Image: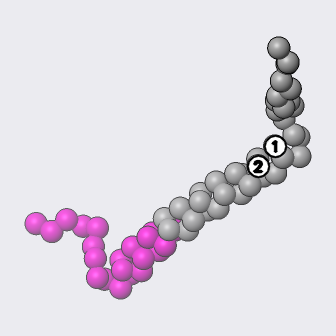
Amino acid sequence: MAAHKIAHATLKGPSVVKEICIGITLGLLAGGMWKMHHWNEQRKVRAFYDMLDKGEISVVAEE
């Protein structure tokens, strides 16, 4: 019987440059999402205090 040669993929270790690029990309993406969350919260707080200054809302409970 003739032995067939099958090309197998050789396993290599992790690519350092690829890992660094993936890490930087994921870090920037997570940082951007976190920053957008804080901008939205800041906008809500600013809108609340603007309405409070204009007298449109009150923090005192009406009886």
Residue for point 78% across, 52% down: 24
Instruction: Locate residue 58 relative to residue 32 in the image: left or right.
Output: left
Is residue 49 among what the camera can see?
Answer: no
Q: Nearer the viewer, residue 47 or 62?
A: 47
- The residue depicted at 31 percent of the width and 83 percent of the height is 55
User: Disc 2 to disc 1, how far (Cα)?
Assistant: 5 Å
Q: Quadrant of residue 47?
A: bottom left
Q: Is residue 32 above or below residue 54?
A: above
State yes or no: discs 2 and 1 in contact (Cβ < 8 Å).
yes
24 above or below 54? Answer: above
- In the image, residue 58 lies in the stretch drawn in magenta: yes
In this view of the protein, can residue 46 be seen by the observer?
yes
Relative height, residue 51 to residue 36 (above, below): below
Mark 2 is on which residue type? Ile
Which residue lies at the image location 36% right of the left edge and 80% below the top edge? 51
Q: Position of residue 53 (x, y in %)?
A: 39, 81
Q: Which residues are magenta?
A: 42-63
Label 1 neighbour load within 10 Å: few <14, some 14-19, many 20+ = few
Classify mark 2: residues with Cα within 10 Å, few (<14), some (14-19) or many (20+). few
- Furthest toward the front, the residue is 1
Above or below 31: residue 51:
below
Image coordinates for residue 29, horizontal then vertical, percent:
66, 57
Looking at the image, the residue that sits furthest to the left is: 63
Please identify the residue farthest to the bottom as the structure is shown. 54
Q: Secondary structure at mark 1?
A: helix
Q: Secondary structure at mark 2?
A: helix
Q: How many marks?
A: 2
State the residue at coordinates (88%, 40%). 16
Identify which residue, 25 or 4, lies in the foreground. 4
From the viewer's perspective, tell me whether residue 36 is left or right of residue 28. left
Provide the residue designation for mark 2: 22
Residue hosting label 1: 19
